[in-house]
Image: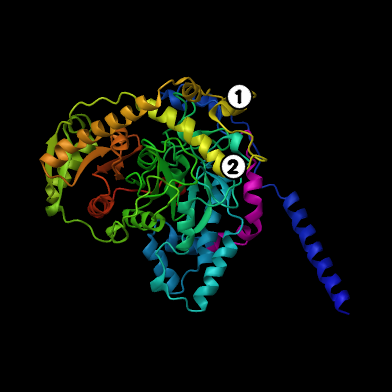
């Protein structure tokens, strides 16, 4: 009798599986379209980097990305989605948690809300940002498990605020269950375990929603090419002006996804400007931390000297929460710090009074940018002490060699430690260059001048160490002359204008929406401080954001 019952169960399960496979085979969520008209329309764009050769990926089938969660997402009705909209859209993490605690929202509904938005906009060729390139197929069930724990009375006061919050990751961050491609076709089969920061996020209860597009190889492949383009994911587009404004790079998908409310928050990475630039271009809050505050293990590298991951969010409060959820000492990262820098989690809740602020303002920016000038006037009127100064002239000689030699060595180490040689057939920069040359139209439509430069760079180890030492000293001189002389809390910049100096100084930088140009293009105010001053920068940013709430949702992504 038991054998017959078991056989019946197997038959039923098999039938269900076959039925589901049939459904998935018959459902076509997305169809490639002819983007030649769009490419032609941008041929005369005043920004040469936006004269695109490709918009769609030639290798990524969005059906493969979106079909696995189609059945779950399709159960959400437009009426149900609209009911959730005011509870979630643009809301900060503490507000969302309050709705869950009060029973107005569940973790499952929170995940399905974001999936609904992603499907709604990303599967429509008229609104797609080419941002989401992978989804966690288990995320809905993982959310349900958190709801079950909630019903059993798991104490919310012992949870990190990131608990249950859906997070998107830049696709150079190793994540179990999803490929980590760095935007390259050479890594499209790169199956890996979790990076250290993803382990920390999961330990704190975050839900990894999926992966987002980026500038291929973190924008260290081609020269003068569009930011936000990768051969694997296609051309990322800016929600404030698709094909009108740049997305910034290289964390392009992280910036656009947060701007369009595709997740609570996203994680980006920066070597020099790759968090600050897309955060500014997409009117979101981005923090590039001090080198060593966050682990880099399991992240496709450019430079072990300058690389760092960092949080990208809709507000300063969430930025502090996401940053704190990734903290931890990683013995596999030589730069990782053991010290526990306090105050980061609470920084987004405790704004610095304007009367206590001492801010350095760069004279040239006051003279050349009207939005920056008006912002400085507003800060002064609010009570901040403003010190205008001209930074010293310092050289950045050898900066490119740091990137060249580090990447030549660090990528080889990453591939050896993390890539499965059965699935990934490259082991060096030279291998990637050769791989790309086999099909230049699909793999490198904008060339690979920077990768070729890596191969040809003859800088010696001794020369490289001298370059690193000189640049770190020069970068710190650029900021410290004013920071020390006038006892400043931070230097104020625009977007990623001074990201290179902050990079070599290994200083943190926080960018917060400052407004919009007459064209509608976002612009941001960037706070730069000394090493491990993240909590202070967040408190400054929180005060500025509260007094001047400049972020506005992109108009085509408000419903």
Residue at the image point whose x is 37% and y is 45% from the top: 335
Magenta stretch encompasses residue 77 = yes
Q: Position of residue 148 (x, y in %)?
A: 55, 73
| 191 relative position to 398: left or right | right
Query: To which quarter of the image does residue 428 belong?
Result: top right
Mark sitting on residue 434:
1
Q: Position of residue 81 (x, y in %)?
A: 52, 61
Residue 537 appears in view: yes
Q: Position of residue 71 (x, y in %)?
A: 66, 58
Q: How many marks?
A: 2
In the rendered view, tell whether residue 240 sits above or below residue 51: below
* SS of the residue under disc 2: loop
Residue at the image point whose x is 44% and y is 24% from the top: 224
Colour scheme of the picture: rainbow
How many angstroms separate mark 1 from mark 2 (CA)? 18 Å
Residue 77 appears in view: no
Q: Nearer the viewer, mark 1 or mark 2?
A: 2
Residues drawn in magenta: 58-80
Magenta region, main secondary structure: helix
Mark sitting on residue 424:
none
Magenta stretch encompasses residue 127 = no
- First in sequence: mark 1 or mark 2? 2
Q: Position of residue 410 (x, y in %)?
A: 47, 36
- Residue lying furthest front: 462
Residue at the image point whose x is 60% and y is 52% from the top: 177
Circle 1 crowding by C-alpha within 10 Å: few under 14, some 14–19, many from 20: few
Circle 2 crowding by C-alpha within 10 Å: few under 14, some 14–19, many from 20: many
Q: Residue at label 2?
A: 419
* SS of the residue under disc 1: helix
Quarter of the picture containing the N terminus is bottom right
Contact flag, marks 1 and 2 (Cβ < 8 Å): no
């Amino acid at each position: 009798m038991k054998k017959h019952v078991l056989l019946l169960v197997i038959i039923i399960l098999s039938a269900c599986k076959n039925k589901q496979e049939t459904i998935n085979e018959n459902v076509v969520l997305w169809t490639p379209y002819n983007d030649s008209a769009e490419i032609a329309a941008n041929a005369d764009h005043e920004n040469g980097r936006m004269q695109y050769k490709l918009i769609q990926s030639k290798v990524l089938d969005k059906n493969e990305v979106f079909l696995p969660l189609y059945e779950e997402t399709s159960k959400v009705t437009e009426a149900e989605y609209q009911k959730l909209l005011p509870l979630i859209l643009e809301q900060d993490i503490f507000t969302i948690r309050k709705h869950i605690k009060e029973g107005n929202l569940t973790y499952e509904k929170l995940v399905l809300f974001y999936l609904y938005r992603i499907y709604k906009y990303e599967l429509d060729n008229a609104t797609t940002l080419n941002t989401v390139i992978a989804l966690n197929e288990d995320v809905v069930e993982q959310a349900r498990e958190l709801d079950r724990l909630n019903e059993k009375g798991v104490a919310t006061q012992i949870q990190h605020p990131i608990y249950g919050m859906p997070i998107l990751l830049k696709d150079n961050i190793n994540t179990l269950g999803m490929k980590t491609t760095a935007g390259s076709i050479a890594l499209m089969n790169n199956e890996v375990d979790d990076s250290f920061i993803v382990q920390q996020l999961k330990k704190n209860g975050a839900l990894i929603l999926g992966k987002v597009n980026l500038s291929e190889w973190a924008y260290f492949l081609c020269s003068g090419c569009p930011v936000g383009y990768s051969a694997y994911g296609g051309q990322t587009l800016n929600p404030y002006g698709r094909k009108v404004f740049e997305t910034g790079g290289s964390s392009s998908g992280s910036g656009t996804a947060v701007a369009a409310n595709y997740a609570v928050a996203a994680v980006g990475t920066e070597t020099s400007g790759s968090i600050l630039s897309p955060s500014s271009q997409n009117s979101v809050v981005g923090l590039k931390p001090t080198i060593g505050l966050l682990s880099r293990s399991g992240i496709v590298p450019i430079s072990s000297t300058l690389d760092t991951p960092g949080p990208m969010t809709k507000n300063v409060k969430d930025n502090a929460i996401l940053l704190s959820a990734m903290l931890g000492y990683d013995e596999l990262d030589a730069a990782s710090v053991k010290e526990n820098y306090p105050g980061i989690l609470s920084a987004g809740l405790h704004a610095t009074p304007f009367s206590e602020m001492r801010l350095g303002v760069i004279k040239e920016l006051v003279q050349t940018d009207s939005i920056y000038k008006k912002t400085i006037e507003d800060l002064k009127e609010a009570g901040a002490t403003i010190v205008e100064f001209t930074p010293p002239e310092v050289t950045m000689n050898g900066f490119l060699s740091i990137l060249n030699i580090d990447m030549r060595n660090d990528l080889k180490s990453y591939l050896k430690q993390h890539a499965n040689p059965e699935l990934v057939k490259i082991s060096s920069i030279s291998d990637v260059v050769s791989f790309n040359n086999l099909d230049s139209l699909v793999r490198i439509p904008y060339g690979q001048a920077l990768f070729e430069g890596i191969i040809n760079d003859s800088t010696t180890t001794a020369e490289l160490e001298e370059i690193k030492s000189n640049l770190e000293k020069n970068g710190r001189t650029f900021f410290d002359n004013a920071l020390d002389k006038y006892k400043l809390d931070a230097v104020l910049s625009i977007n990623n204008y001074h990201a290179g100096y902050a990079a070599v100084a290994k200083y943190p930088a926080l960018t917060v929406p400052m407004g919009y140009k007459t064209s509608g293009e976002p612009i941001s105010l960037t706070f730069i401080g000394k090493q491990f001053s993240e909590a202070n920068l967040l408190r400054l940013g929180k005060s500025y954001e509260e007094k001047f709430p400049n972020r506005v949702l992109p108009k085509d992504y408000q419903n």
